[in-house]
Amino acid sequence: MPPLVLGLALLLLVSVVCGVGLGAAGIGWAEVLRLLRAGLTGGTIEAGDVSAYAIVWEIRLPRVVLGAVVGAGLAAVGVAVQAMVRNALADPFVLGISSGAAVGANAVILLGAFAGLGVWALSLSAFGSALAAMALVYAVARSPHGLTPLRLVLTGTALAYGFEAVTTVMVFGAARGEAARSAMMWLLGSLGGATWAQVPLAAVTVAAGWAWLRLRAEALNALAMGDETSAALGVRPARLRRELFLVTAAVTGTVVAVSGAIGFVGLMVPHVVRMLVGADHRRVLAVAPLAGAVLLVWADLLSRLLLTPAELPVGVITAVVGVPAFLLLMRRGGYAFGGR
């Protein structure tokens, strides 16, 4: 474990440097490292370096850092969702939270709703609609016997179709042009609008969610063995599932609000990590966030470079990798919702 965690941490550091150093604007590696060192140490730069400094520190670096935070958050909640529904092929979006967030985001992009919130309109609207979607899924899925995995999955999937229908009506009802293109970029996931102002809230939420999951790792091990087994081990499965649902919704809503709907990270990363370190959630939760951060940093870098100077949605890159991985895992594992 220590060599693996250290190796992933070093790989993440190298990935961040590569993400900052590569891009449409040709800035040499020596200059990138010099500007990064100047920014970190408070050093001075020459007048001719102002534009390059702005590209490195105000455009590329916040985007790469936010990508790492989002990737770590999606991977961590992917582990939580898969334990909650006892299905290794579930991901954070199976509960309909992402589709709910899309409704709020597109209300801002296409209809100009909440314009009075200024630059925070998109993030706050997406986050608020994600929480509303969470509340609706919880209310519908809850039964006198508590929250069961199958009810959560079926309710989330059904309501996700409803949220997507609302979003489609917005896109077709709005005027065509740049707004519709922005809506599609957001629906497919994009870090193009990343700023330093978005990083603190996302980072704190992801860190808090990950810390809580680490504290409950033993309970997650019990829950993954079934409700009867977990109850025999002193874990209250219904209560733990409610807590997991709240933590998952909060983290997913926060990262979706700043990055859009990026799929497959929460599906692939936990499963691959389990293949490396086993099923113990203490180990999985130590490795999965680092792996998710590395994956999304490189996916975002590819989205910027493949069609330079145009940009692909980062969700397209994760889908290109994720769809074959999903099919391969499904054929190898034979998983089904609610059990094997």
Image (tube, rainbow, N blue to C red):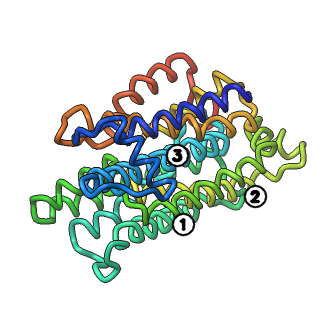
Q: Quadrant of the N terminus?
A: top right
Q: CA distance from mark 3 to mark 2?
A: 23 Å
Query: Does residue 116 appear to the left or right of 291 in the view shown?
Result: left
Residue at numbered disc 2: 239
User: Which residue is found at the position 51% from the left and 40% from the top?
Assistant: 293
- Give residue 270's position: percent from left, percent from top: 59, 34
Residue at the left extreme? 176
Q: Which mark is residue 74?
A: 3
**Residue flagged by tag 1: what amino acid is it?**
Ala
x, y (%) of residue 190? 33, 49
Does residue 322 appear left or right of residue 236 in this picture? left
Circle 1 or circle 3, nearest the eye: 3
Task: Tell me the CA gap for discs 2 and 1.
Answer: 16 Å
Which residue appears farthest toward the top when viewing the image? 332
Which of the pair 28/316 is nearer the observer? 28
* 10 Å crowding of disc 1: few (<14), some (14-19), many (20+): some
Q: Which residue is mark 1?
A: 135
Quadrant hosting residue 80: top right
Q: Give the Cα separation between the discs numbered 1 and 3.
A: 20 Å
Q: Earlier in the sequence, mark 2 or mark 1?
A: 1
Q: Nearer the viewer, residue 139 or 284?
A: 284
37 relative to 221, above or below: below
Q: Is residue 64 left or right of residue 193?
A: right
Does 150 appear above or below 337? below
Where is residue 72 shown, x and y percent of the image? 55, 44
Q: Amino acid at mark 3?
A: Leu
Q: Choose the circle earlier in sequence order: 1 or 3.
A: 3
Residue at left offset 76%, top offset 38%:
282
Secondary element under disc 3, as helix, strand or loop, is helix
Q: Is residue 303 visible?
A: no
Mark before the other along the chain sequence, 3 or 2: 3
